[in-house]
Image: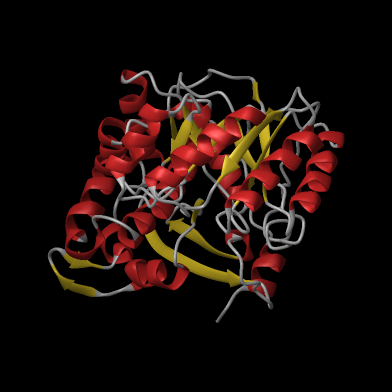
Amino acid sequence: MKITGVEAMYLRLPQVRELCDSGQDALIIKVLTDEGITGIGEVDSAPLAVKGAIDGPFSHTTACGLREIVLGEDPFQTEYLWHKMYRQSIYGGRRGAGLHAISGIDMALWDIKGKALGLPVWKLLGGGFHQRIRPYASTLFGATPEETGERARCFRDRGFTAVKFGWEPMGQDEKTDIGLVREARKGLGDDADLMIDAGLVWDAKTAIQRARAFSDYRIFWLEEPLLPDDYDGYAKLSRATDVRIAAGEEESNRHSFIELMDRGQIDVVQVDLTRVGGFTEAMKIASLAFDRGIPVVNHGFTTYVNVAAALHFLNSIPNSFILEFVVEEQTTLRDCITKQKIVARDGYLDIPSAPGLGIDLNEDGIAKYRVA
């Protein structure tokens, strides 16, 4: 089997709101083969920057578009192809958008292998740690503390036992910050787990103050309160509070995660398959976290392609326990571009059993939202 093509398809809603909802557009990757098997991947990034990293022509031996690098290669050689892409795009691609681009292709290659062998990706990765996994409802804060409380009640009534609220208006002032968390806890009740995603809004001293205040409301973790490169700030914060500190969605390969874990001393590692280099790199990151006694969760605020990939990944590692599951109802892109819609049953998500990722594109939805 040989790779015959790579497509990077940019999808976008007709109207995109100015808030931190990365489900309003998407970059879907197809890898085609000469045996008619097509692999699907996704990248959550700056979509057109990643598309350029994939579609670009050969410039020189360390600056080449990824499609040129993998054409004609055997899609089963995922480790070899990961290093080939990394090495031959290293000039501009060793972090950020370049690594994100590798993620989408790597994910599609694993999908091809699973389809060709008739096995789900988690079996190819040697997994089997879960039969099902608990999701947490991942959403944005309401515009006010009171609206946040109402949203919390809705998710509780829908059967979620864990909910995460994030981003704006967190960070405006102390009263609002505490009010958002207070009302979220009141709406969820005492039994559900509450996670808070601050959205990179504070310095270390302020984050310490907020973590101590939020501990009164028994939050399960405080996510990304600091800028991603403030590893020393993360260390100060982690030492100063008993609240778990979660981070990782901004990181793009294992070297960055080592800094975050060893220097930043975080408590929960968040891995986004569409950013860290796909399954090939994510498994290495999970092993590094396991060796340090740190649990791993996914990050994903985009489509069911990402959700399916996360289910396979979390089922393949021993240090996983919960899955991020987006419930933003104003985002319609996710429900239109895949044939399958992943839903929770009795408060849990089933592990996929179909070959590959177990997800298929809805070509009508792709055509509707694809940007020429």
Identity of the residue drawn at 55% across and 55% down: 171
* Residue 271 in view (yes/no): no
Quadrant that contains the C terminus: bottom right
Residue 156: quadrant of the picture: top right
Is 92 placed above or below 211 here? below
- Looking at the image, which residue sits at the far bottom? 372
- The percent coordinates of residue 125 (x first, y second) are 43, 28
* Residue 322 in view (yes/no): yes
Is 97 placed above or below 259 here? below
Say left or right for 275 vs 157.
Answer: left
Of residues 281 and 232, the one nearer the viewer is 232
Q: How is the image coloured?
A: secondary structure
- The percent coordinates of residue 41 (x first, y second) are 49, 52
Identity of the residue drawn at 48% across and 24% down: 242
- The percent coordinates of residue 47 (x first, y second) are 46, 68
| Number of numbered discs overlaid on the protein picture | 0
Of residues 109 and 277, the one nearer the viewer is 277
- The percent coordinates of residue 141 (x first, y second) are 68, 52
Of residues 184 and 291, the one nearer the viewer is 184
Residue 66: quadrant of the picture: bottom left
- Looking at the image, which residue sits at the far right? 157
Identity of the residue drawn at 35% across and 66% down: 54
Say left or right for 127 vs 334.
Answer: left
Say left or right for 209 vs 185.
Answer: left
Of residues 47 and 357, the one nearer the viewer is 47
Identity of the residue drawn at 46% across and 33% down: 245
